[in-house]
Every structure is written in C-alpha cells, then in structure tokens.
Amino acid sequence: MKFKRIAAMLLAAAMVMSLVACGSSSSSSSSSDSSSSDAAEEETEDAEAEEEEEESDSLLGSDSATIRLTIGTTTSADGHYVLGLVAMQEKLEELSDGEMTLDIYPNSALGGESDMMDAVSLGTQDMVLSSTGPIPSFSSATSNWATLDLPYLFETKEDAYAVFDGEIGQELLDEFEGTGIKALGIWENGYRELTNNTKEIATPDDLAGMKIRTMENDVHMATYTALGATPTAMAWGEIFSALQQGTVDGQENPLAIILTAKVYEVQQYVSMIDLFYSPCVLMINEDTYNNFTDDQKAWFDEAAEYGKEQERAISQEIEDSAREQMEAEGVIFTDVDKEVWIEAVQSVYEDESLGIDQDLLARIQEVTAD
Ligand code: EAX
C-alpha cells in the first residue's frame, strides 16, 4: 500500500541522516586539536540542520504548485495524521494537474491545536488537522461538539464512522459556517488509552489522586474527575516537559500517537481503557475555500475525502502493530474490565454544566444502537 511506501521513505531518510550525523560526531571525538573539533562540531550541526530541512522538505508540496495551503498538526511526521495528509497532498496535486498542493508542518511547528484553530479562522494559517479537543470552546456555534467528547460514546469504530460520515456528521461540520473556518471532514485520532510511569492501572481506584494531562476540553476533564484523578489540561506540545517536571503523572492518547510521538519512551505503563473515541477534523480558512473556483473546490473536496479514507486505514494499520512494538521495548500493557470504567463515568452524561446536547446524543445513540 502507498502509505507503507511513504512510511518506509520517511524512516529510511531519518536513518540515513542519523548515520550521517553519527559519522561526523565520531570524527569530532577522534580529533585532538580544538580547531578541528570545532570544525567537526560545525559539520555535525550542518548535518543536523540538513536533516531537519530534509524532513520538512519531504512534507512540502511540489515546487511548481501555485496554490499552496499551509497545514499544521501536533503529531509527528510518521504519524497517522501526517501520512493521511501526504496522501491528500498527492491526490490534490494529481487532480489539479500540479496547480494546488499542501505544505505540511507536523510536531506543533505552527502551534497547539487551539491556537492553530484561531489562526485558521483569522486567515493567518490556511489549514489545520486538529482533534476535537478545542472545538466546543472555539465558538458558541460549535459548543454542542462537546457531545462527541463523552466517554464510551462509540463502542466500535464502525459506529463512529456511521455517525461522522452520515447526516449528523455533515450537520456538525456545517455548524462552523460563519466562524471563519470551513470544516471538511472527520478523520481519525483513535481510542484514547492511559499511560503513566508509576504503576499498572487496572481500575479507577488505581488512578485515585494521579495527575493526568487531558486535552483542553471540559468533558474530558470532568471524566477524569469522575474517575478520581486530578486532570490538568494543556496543549500537546507541552506534554513532554510536563511529564519530565512531574507537573503530571500520566496522559492519554491513542496507541498510534503513543508510539509515533515516542511517549512510550517516558511512560512505561499503558492501560487499555478505550475511554474516548477521538476524532479529528480537517479545517480550512472559510474565505480561502470560498475563493476557490468550482473546479478547485471539486479537486480539493475529492482529495480531502481520499485523505480521510487513507488516514483511517493508516491509523488502523499503525494501531494494529503498536502494542507489539512497544511491548518489545519493555512497555507494560494492562487490559481492563471496561464495564467498571463505563460505570464510573456515568455521572458525566448527566452533568448539565458540560453543554451536552441531549437531542444530538439521542440521535447518535439511535444510529449506533444496532
Ligand atoms: O490531535 O492533544 C492531544 O492529546 C491530541 O490527541 C493530539 O494533539 C493529536
């Protein structure tokens, strides 16, 4: 499959560049006089700079495109968001005969999700692929998206896809109209699992009093409070220093992110709680989209739909091997009795302060009932 090729290319490029970097640093340690070691150091820096340039270059669209859309994500270059966007980029170039492309910036290079949504609505950034974390607080028009953040709302991915690809999903996307953002499609982040570096967590009791980083999202915070933890909301880009400094004890994200962002290198325990099915949304500045010609809109829409399908498949593919790969690195996985967790979060469904849209909830439950 195509994305395997992309992943392999990224991996190969990273390996070659790290060999280059190792080569020059070993020459620096073997040199005796300080001037040549300075030179070797410079060489190392050059190799590192080149490595960064090479990595970002590979995510920029074709040089010849005249409509270049800058898109940011918080996730890493070999993660599911970015590989899905690369598929969209290639499709967009193909359909537009090279006229349109995406320039992709991973790893929060353009900021956190909430900041990027603001930038897209103001037009200082063209596009973002963001989790739904910041959506309920983005605008009163989108506040009922909080309903999607409820724990254990979607038992299977098929349930989630049926809602997001159907009438309800389209209505939710349309709610962005007039906010400065056009929302185009609901892609996949994945089922969120819990990590920490202290102990195995099998029940909410094991979690009591632990400080857990959540997204900047009231429903997620309320859920962790209901579970007995102390939630701390922060943007994804701050997570590694927060874990290092002990501001938080743990975090939660889909396995695809725990693996590709290398969270597992600093978190030894993963509990398979599947607490939230987390979607992400492809967004573009509304005026930018509206100013496209009809042809350009059609190419863009088709490429976006293609990107979504590819991204979901890539997400599943990464998830399928993630546990095994991390177990091989010594990460300890805990399977839990989900019924206990489901029971522990029921109060969140009844919390009237959270902006849950009961009609929307009932319609979602109707679609997912059978
Ligand atoms: O959208 O912030 C998070 O935990 C998200 O899952 C991540 O930024 C990818």
Image (tube, grey):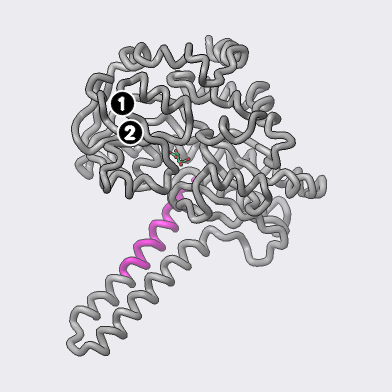
Q: Is residue 14 magenta?
A: yes
Q: Which residue is mark 1?
A: 229
Q: SS for tag 2?
A: strand
In this rendering, the answer to whether 324 lies above or below 49 is above
Viewer-proximal residue, 116 or 164?
A: 116
Instruction: Tell me which amino acid carries mark 1.
Output: Ala
Q: Quadrant of residue 276?
A: top left
Viewer-proximal residue, 309 or 255?
A: 255
Q: SS for tag 1?
A: loop
Q: Is residue 257 magenta?
A: no
User: Which residue is farthest front?
Assistant: 353
Q: Which residue is mark 2?
A: 212
**Residue range highlighted in magenta:** 1-19
Q: What residue is drawn where x is 68% and y is 34%? A: 176
C-alpha span from label 2 to label 1: 7 Å
* Mark earlier in primary sequence (2, 1): 2
Residue 320 visible at all: no
Position of residue 163 measured from the top left corner of the image (x, y, whole percent): 59, 22
In this rendering, the answer to whether 42 lies above or below 116 is below
Q: What residue is drawn where x is 33% and y is 24%? A: 273
